[in-house]
Image: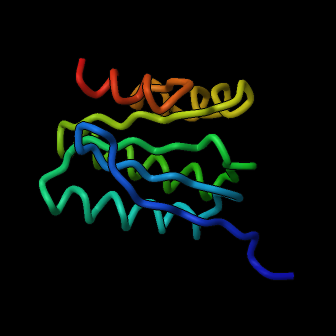
Amino acid sequence: MGEPTFSLQVGSSANGVPVLTFHGYYSQQGGEAVEAQVAAALDRGQKNVILDLTKCTIINSPGIAKLMDVVMKVVDDFRGKLVLVGLDNSKKQFLTMTGVLPLATAVSTLAEAERAMSG
């Protein structure tokens, strides 16, 4: 059986913040794809990122580890902001227990994420 599938679309919000929209299974492979796109944004001088996980079906432990790497890079290394969109209650609880959410901000919609970036 192969690696569970995912897709990642890259766009930007109305105010120019990178928006990464993740679909499917967030494993280490998916986390590495997100990490590469965030690194590219940081290299362009964009220190704030929106990660839309509305269509993310599940996040496994290696995926959480990669997500924590991304959060630490954005928030600690670059003094930026990472906003997570569309988390269900179980993902919110898991990300809180693992320490991701105290560092990142969780909101329900992309519009809320854009407001969080301007505030």
Quadrant of the rendering where the C terminus is positioned = top left
Q: Residue furthest bottom?
A: 1
Q: How is the image coloured?
A: rainbow
| Lateral position of residue 2 relative to residue 54, left or right | right
**84 in relation to 11, above or below:** above
Which x, y percent locates residue 95?
59, 33
Q: Nearer the viewer, residue 95 or 8?
A: 8
Q: Nearer the viewer, residue 57 or 63?
A: 57
Q: Residue furthest front?
A: 14
Which x, y percent locates residue 96?
57, 26
Q: Nearer the viewer, residue 83 or 110?
A: 110
**26 in relation to 33, above or below:** above
| Lateral position of residue 42 relative to residue 56, left or right | left
Q: Residue at x 17, y 62 (%)?
A: 43
Count the marks.
0
Q: Residue at x 36, y 63 (%)?
A: 37
Q: Residue at x 39, y 41 (%)?
A: 50
Give the image quarter of residue 23.
bottom right
| Lateral position of residue 12 relative to residue 94, left or right | left
Which x, y percent locates residue 112?
43, 22
Give the image quarter of residue 94.
top right
Quadrant of the rendering where the N terminus is positioned = bottom right
| Lateral position of residue 41 relative to residue 29, left or right | left
Q: Residue furthest right?
A: 1
**76 in relation to 33, above or below:** above
Which x, y percent locates residue 53?
59, 43
**88 in relation to 8, above or below:** above
Q: Residue at x 48, y 67 (%)?
A: 32
